[in-house]
Image: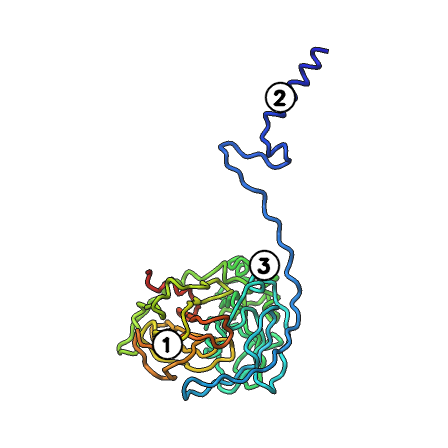
Amino acid sequence: MARLLSLVLMLLGALLAMPSRALAGGPLPPPGGLFQAPPTPTPAPLPTPILIPSPTPTPTPRPASASESAKAPTYRLFLPQLRLSPPPAGRAETAVIPSPASEAASLPHVGPPVGRFLYTVEPGDTLNRLAIALGRDVRLMSCVRQEDGQPVNELDEGMVLLIPALGDLCHRVRPGETLARIAAWYGVEPEALLSANPFVDESALRPGQYLLVPDARSRYRDPEEARLPRTPGNGWRYGDGQFIWPIANGATAITQGFRHGQHMALDIAAEPGTPVYAADTGTVLTAGWSDNGYGYHIVIDHGIDYITLYAHLREYFVKSGDIVKKGDIIGLVGSTGNSTGPHLHFEIRDYGYLIDPLLVLPKK
């Protein structure tokens, strides 16, 4: 009896000596006091996108200058909870197309659409102009396809294009590459590549062929494009690449930063009417109204493979073809287009790619 009592006391003492986490059923911490929590459960998939009816058209805003407002495109947006500026009366209603689930679907967004959408070609459209108007990398437009997935050789009025998402990338096939190797390089599955490129023959990839790589931007950027040589031109219409803030207090008023594939710009809050400055010297490509969410906006080509965009302006003081110097006042802060309040939406393209402006703006 005494021996049995002794065994019971020993077992009770061992249990009391164990950590409380073990008694609660949790994992024991490793020696040294470090503890790695169990993995977070995979979140439930997002609901299937639903049809977004076109909102009731509103009057076209009065131009701030003599510049003629651009015609509104026809677009079809797949993301739930997002609306673009309404198309003019008489245009066809928009419809939803399927797309892979993305974090961007649950985030507030203003400006051009985040995901893939359909666009109907208008007279005078080019892929380079559409890249700027639709908030895409210039190089991403090489992977624009027709609605049925066929490649685009040239743009014809009325042609319906499938515009890639902000999170997509466009890869040009190199000699000797295979689909499996390309997929591994970008961190995606080969099946995802085939699904995004339905007319590609997996067994006969051609050098120079373009492949759309879905939802890859957050995981990859070609290291060869990180530091390409930048040769300044001769003449005062060229920038020097030493940017200034487009708003005087810009560094202290950022309300939304750069997020890959979601919000590829800076939103800088300011009072309505605050001056907007040219961030570097260059030539104005576009100045006027945009129905793609930017409202009144200005695009400047700095001549050294940098392009800047300034959106949601209340007024603008330049026109296409004007040469502006760094620090010139080009417009005033407003809340036009898809905007939740007065602020400047500021983008920088570097060799065609949208980059985080904080990488090249001065620290304050």
| Secondary structure type for disc 1 | strand
Marked residue nearer the N-terminal end (1 or 2): 2
Q: Residue at x 57, y 73 (%)?
A: 83
The type of residue carrying mark 3 is: Glu
Marked residue nearer the N-terminal end (3 or 2): 2
Categorize mark 2 by other alpha carbons within 10 Å: few (<14), some (14-19), many (20+): few
Residue 98, image x, y percentages? 64, 69
Confirm or deny contact between disc 3 and disc 2 (CB under 8 A): no
Label at residue 13: 2
Confirm or deny contact between disc 1 and disc 3 (CB under 8 A): no
Q: Measure the C-alpha gap from mark 3 to mark 2.
A: 54 Å
Label at residue 189: 3
Q: Residue at x 51, y 80 (%)?
A: 291
Categorize mark 3 by other alpha carbons within 10 Å: few (<14), some (14-19), many (20+): some
Residue 73, image x, y percentages? 54, 82
Vertical comparison of 313 with 65: above or below: above
Q: Residue at x 59, y 32 (%)?
A: 20
The N terminus: image quadrant: top right
The type of residue carrying mark 1 is: Asp
Q: Nearer the viewer, residue 247 or 358?
A: 247
Residue 7, image x, y percentages? 67, 16
Disc 1 or disc 3, which is closer to the eye? 1
Marked residue nearer the N-terminal end (1 or 3): 3
The residue where tag 1 is placed is: 301
